[in-house]
């Protein structure tokens, strides 16, 4: 039986031109499932256009959209009135992209549903896709049984400093930008800091699985 094939795409952060170009590079998608690792919005200039693109793209490819901490901050700002954290982390650029000034006004219904419907994780036979990572002290199964732990799926970084972990399969994640993709025994990190204009960063990265073949796009949105 042939293994499932995937393409996972790292943190976009409002970089519309970059993700559009990367998707063109990756075509044809054949029978691969496309996993977007979250953080579609904030910091970069064109969050609204990124979501428009992804909504159109899901009509032509088999997509999974994971939730990033930035989508969670948007939802918390709208649903729990927790605006300050979002504003401190690039939320203003997202509102600007929607033409929303000063106060938070309703987003387009289709876009808000997109944010609400993002997944906390995506579990497959060989890979566990998640925005930020998992506790290195627990198995994947144990983390999935712990509601508090699942909230950390959007923020986790401790696995990056752990010598080992008990994960049952390879975990694919973004969230923490690095100059190059991270590959260890059972983890693959694909956030290469597309939105950051500093030495070694400024790329949007995808990985083809199971080949572990990386394809990147230099940021076109600076």
Image (cartoon, rainbow, N blue to C red):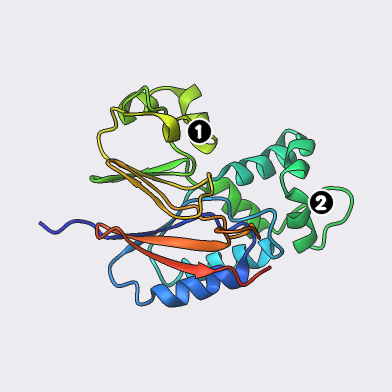
Residue 104, x across and y down, in percent: 82, 48
Label 1: element kind: loop
Residue 4, x across and y down, in percent: 23, 57
- Mark 2: give few (<14), some (14-19) or many (20+) Cα within 10 Å: few
Left or right: 62, with 36 as reference point? left
Q: Residue at x 51, y 30 (%)?
A: 152
Left or right: 36, with 100 as reference point? left
Residue 156 numbered mark, or none: 1
CA distance separating discs 2 and 1: 30 Å
Q: Quadrant of residue 32?
A: bottom left
Label 2: element kind: loop
Q: Quick one: quadrant of the N terminus?
A: bottom left
Whether residue 24 can be seen here: yes
Sequence-wise, the earlier of marks 2 and 1 is 2
Q: Quadrant of residue 81?
A: top right
Q: In this rendered view, identify the residue nearer to me: 75 or 129.
A: 129
Residue 114, x across and y down, in percent: 57, 54
Q: Quadrant of residue 17?
A: bottom right
Q: How many marks?
A: 2
Looking at the picture, does residue 145 appear above or below residue 108?
Answer: above
User: For mark 2, what is the residue?
Assistant: 105
Residue 42, x across and y down, in percent: 68, 53
């Amino acid at each position: 039986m042939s293994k499932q094939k995937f393409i996972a795409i790292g943190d976009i952060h409002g970089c519309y031109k970059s993700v559009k170009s990367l998707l063109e590079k990756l075509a044809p998608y054949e029978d691969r499932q496309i996993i977007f690792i979250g953080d579609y919005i904030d910091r970069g200039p064109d969050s609204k256009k990124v979501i428009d693109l992804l909504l159109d793209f899901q009509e032509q490819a088999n997509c999974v959209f994971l939730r990033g901490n930035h989508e969670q901050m948007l939802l918390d700002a709208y649903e729990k009135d927790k605006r300050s954290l979002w504003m401190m982390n690039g939320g203003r650029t997202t509102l600007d992209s929607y033409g929303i000034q000063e106060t938070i006004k309703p987003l387009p219904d289709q876009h808000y549903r997109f944010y609400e419907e993002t997944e906390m994780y995506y579990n497959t036979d060989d890979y566990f896709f998640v925005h930020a990572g998992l506790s290195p002290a627990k198995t994947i199964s144990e983390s999935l049984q712990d509601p508090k732990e699942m909230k950390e799926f959007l923020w986790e970084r401790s696995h990056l400093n752990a010598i080992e972990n008990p994960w049952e399969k390879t975990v694919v994640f973004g969230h923490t930008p690095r100059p190059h993709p991270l590959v260890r025994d059972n983890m693959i990190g694909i956030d290469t800091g597309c939105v950051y204009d500093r030495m070694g960063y400024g790329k949007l990265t995808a990985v083809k699985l199971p080949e572990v073949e990386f394809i990147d796009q230099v940021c076109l949105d600076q």
